[in-house]
Amino acid sequence: MAEGALFNVAEGIIGQLGNLALKELELLWGVKEELQKLEDTVSTIKAVILDAEEQQAQNHTIRNWLGRLKDALYEADDLLDDFSTEVLRREVMTRNKKAKEVRIFFSKSNQLAYGLKMGHKIKAIRERLDAIAADRKFHLVERPRETQVSNRVRETHHFVRAEDVIGREVDKKVIIDRLMDPKIEENVSVLPIVGIGGLGKTTLAQFVFNAEEIKNHFEKKLWVCVSDDFDVKIIVEKILECAKEKKPERLEMNTLINDLQKEIDGKRYLLVLDDVWDDDSEKWDKLKGFLLGGARGSRILVTTRQEKVARISKTIEPHFLRGLNEKESWSLFKQKAFEKGQEPKNLRIKEIGMEIVRKCGGIPLAIKTIGSLLCFKNSEDEWSSFMNKEFSKLNQKENDILPTLKLSYDHLPSHLKQCFAYCSLFPKDYQIEKEIMIRLWMAQGLLKQSSKNQCLEDVGHEYFIDLRWRSFFQEVEGKVTKFKIHDLMHDLAILVVGQESITFGINEEKMDEKTHHMSFGLNFGSSTQIPTLLLKANRMRTFLLPCQKWNSNQMVWKQLTCDAFVSSFKFLRLLDLHETGIRNVPHFIGKLKHLRYLDLSWNRHIKMLPNSITRLQNLETLNLFGCGELTELPKNISKLVNLRHLNINGCNSLTHMPCGFGQLTNLHSLTQYVLSTDSRCGGELKELHGLNQLRENLRIKNMRHGKEKRYLKGLALEWIEREVDVGYDEMSVDALEPNQNLNSLELKYYRGVKYPSWLSLLKNLVSLQFGSLKNIQDGLPLNQFPSLKSLWLSDIPSLEYVSLVSEGFKLPPLESLSILDCPNLKGWWKRSDSIEEDEDAADNYSEISTITAKNHSLPSFTHLSNLYISFCPKLSSMPLFPYLEKLNLPYSNLRPLERTISMGMISTASQENPTAAAVAESTSSARSYSSSTLAASFTPLSKLKSLYIVMIEGSDGHVLQSIQHLTALEEFSLYNYNGDGMELEWQGLRKLQYLRLIDHPKLASLPVGLQQATSLRDLVISSCPSLTTLPEWICEIISLQSLQIWDCPNLTSLPALTSLKTLDIWRCPILVESCKSQDWVARIENLQGDLAPPKEEGPEQSKTDEEYELKTRGFTKIFGRCSGSTSQ
């Protein structure tokens, strides 16, 4: 247990005793008297716990006394939880009073025997506590209640990080100047930032990283947190994850390096390696070797506490970060300690505050933490007492701020102490999901309601906000659902938790039989051994695998091992078995009666859950995410009366929900509800009627027919994909009546002709997805959704217009728009003077100008950055997209694109050539906007970076002449072009880096103008049977590093492309034979496809497999000793 948290445990026991006293069951006869005596004893002890916990640091006798008390209180807690569970189980079973076995089970003799047995146990634990209380030979002050801190009204804007960069403007400028220094000769140079913990090295690096001049100077920005483990492969994986914005597959090191080089080679990049500790120069040199392919001016910014790391890594002299000066420190302190950061009116409080700030030594983390603590102290006496009695006694060495942080911890309320200390189970720099953390706290009973009507999840949210406000937690930039703990705060959590919580790989040496919480700070499958001492900790409450990553080719846990483990720890509240590769959940799991949280996610081969799992009446969270082969849930799942969270996303083999599902009235989150396609089996839609606590998002699959769920954030409705009565679908969807606060809505396979009647009432929608709506023809009321950011329309064959124009029409702030398989879609909005009729024949400058003005008179998508239009051949117009960055147009009419580009030409011309603008304006209709007005507003597609086109059969390719005007274009993919040549004015595409030419049957040679694309790095040519050779001038594009050629059977040879680092040739037999005799080809670092060297199993991989087998065998052997059934 964390230091100072015993008070909360005692309070929890008293709460359990109070709940049991209210029960009117025969089971409690003869026990209630003992329960009352136990409550009296615990209440007497609880009254002095707060004083004892404060004195234990200076008094060894008190510390030992608290240790004995802790053990006894934990056992009392387990005993009462056991008893409460039995009471609950009998209440559940009485639902079916006709069952013979229930009558036998509830016979008076049965209940009397159990009551006597439990009475003896309660008496024994009470006498033990009485003895501990009597053994107290020291004086303690009684404080039966914890002093409540008054929470000031705080707004969320207090959590923004503007204060984090106080006093760092000069440092920022110095670092940016050095990062952008043109005199540095190396292509890739390294600048370390050095400073003690808590100084704000990471904050400063973020400040620099997000600066506008840095954004404009570097082509690619990458951020990797290294922390304690300087594993080169892991760091490369993290760099790739940052570059590609997705986790890389589990790949061999060579493949990872090749992928890395594709991302950074030839580009001027900035890589931040944050929080580096390892001073092994060999590891550093190995990593740096992989990063040297960047263009000149590339930089690596390293943050570290150790000067030795800086000396090893640097190529530029390190920047040594100092503490804040007194003025800056006071400014930061004010923001945390005083409401709205204002100067205190009480001069004495100001004097005390400034003295405290001076003692913080300019360290921002210490200043913020102490400031947050004092924020809750309002009077001068409280400030003086803190300064004189506590802060002045700190034994703080230079460069050590842990004592200061510990002081802030000591001032936390007891419930927050436990919650913070529990976070020690996660490794340093781990990004923790807030909602998951709240459920873990809940499983351990750490959340306390102030009233019966208060939702536990809301209590957890309040705790989280409080800890974040006090600087114990940090937000993860760009991820509102995640948080981190500063590494010094993590050190503090490990310090205060002692032997109570152990993380294998960090502090497992502290483990003993009193350890209650255990996690693995590394991948469980790669652990060297499981400590045998773990078996002695038989009162374990937590087993957590935060770093677990399962390789589908491995089984981390064999079945006997898993069975033995589960049967060894009967007091578990939390069991995490995710990604362990198990195929069967142990039947013994039903005996883990204390279990609140069970994670079985990503065990893809689990087909069934044992029905014994329904004995877990205390279970609150069941996570089955990604159990792809699971076919059904246990038929008696309704017995899980305390279940609050059920995640069955990714359980794609589920055929139905069990009958009685609607009895789970405590459910707060249900990811999906699967209706059976056979109406004769499984739970029906009406089972959802009583689940009125549901929050977050819900998907209903296989809809046939269908009240308000007040807390739902998202709703997905999926009908059975078959022909049904149209009116029936409309009635069923109208009957659902979702709440008007819904953030996301998805309809799939709906056969109604009209949209749901309640659709226009959903003013808070952020995401809207419609798929396979076969009978919908009307446009959407887009002006009714002022918050809509994402719209996805797919397979709506009767849809003709996306929306309708009305008076005062205003488009929502869409950021992403996808329209797929809408073959009759004509335009974006229908209006009286149909623009579409005018547009089809428009080709010359004046006609396009007229259309430009008409389009400009309509609203534009001013926030849209991503547009995807596929298989919409009749779409003949586009609105304006001033900030579009990514445009995908497979199998769609390209005339709208051509006209939009032409608008940009007119806009530019109106600025550069007023005469041309006047001509355009003279031909416009009377109601048109002037081109000067248009030019002043924006240039369409001027921000476009990525363009993907798949030509419709028979297209003339006329649009290609316009692409030269997309001057920001970096990536261009063209598929299915049937023209002879592709002569563009390529000089306009100076930023083009990626070009893909695929399925061009008549392409005989590369376009000559391509040699003007001087930034080209990656060229893909595929399915071009007429191509026989590549021109010699391609060698002049020295930026070209990767060339991929597939299915070009008549291509005979390549010129000597010595700049290449990757060459991939596949199904080009003549070319492959030619390349095999070329010396320059043999020197290419990465040869793939038919040129790749034959694969051999390396000794390193063999060694890894062998080590894994030994580890797994060793683990089974260890647990084989704890159960006779596995001792073979």
Image: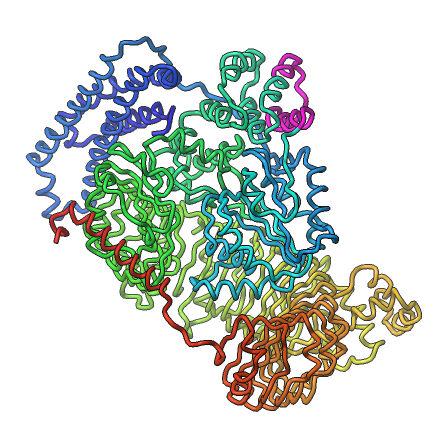
Residue drawn at point x = 63 percent, y = 66 percent:
867
> In the figure, 95 relative to 983: above or below?
above
* The N terminus - image quarter: top left
- Magenta segment's dominant SS is helix
The one nearer the camera, 265 or 621, is: 265
How far across and down, in percent of the image, does residue 490 sit? 45, 36
Left of 382 or right of it: where is 534? Answer: left
- Does the segment drawn in magenta span residue 765? no
> In the figure, 115 relative to 434: above or below?
above
> In the figure, 236 relative to 394: above or below?
below
Residue 671: image quadrant is bottom left
Across the whole image, how many numbered discs are drawn on residues? 0
The one nearer the camera, 990 or 601, is: 990
> In the figure, 1017 relative to 27: above or below?
below
Residue 26: image quadrant is top left
The answer to whether any part of residue 451 appears in the image is no
Residue drawn at point x = 61 percent, y = 18 percent:
353
Residue sticking out furthest to the right: 915
- Does the segment drawn in magenta span residue 343? yes
* The C terminus - image quarter: bottom left
How far across and down, in percent of the image, does residue 342 sit? 67, 24
Q: Which stretch did the figure color magenta?
A: 325-352
How far across and down, in percent of the image, does residue 485 sit? 49, 38
How far across and down, in percent of the image, does residue 1114 sit? 23, 52
The answer to whether any part of residue 477 appears in the image is yes
Residue drawn at point x = 69 percent, y = 83 percent:
1032
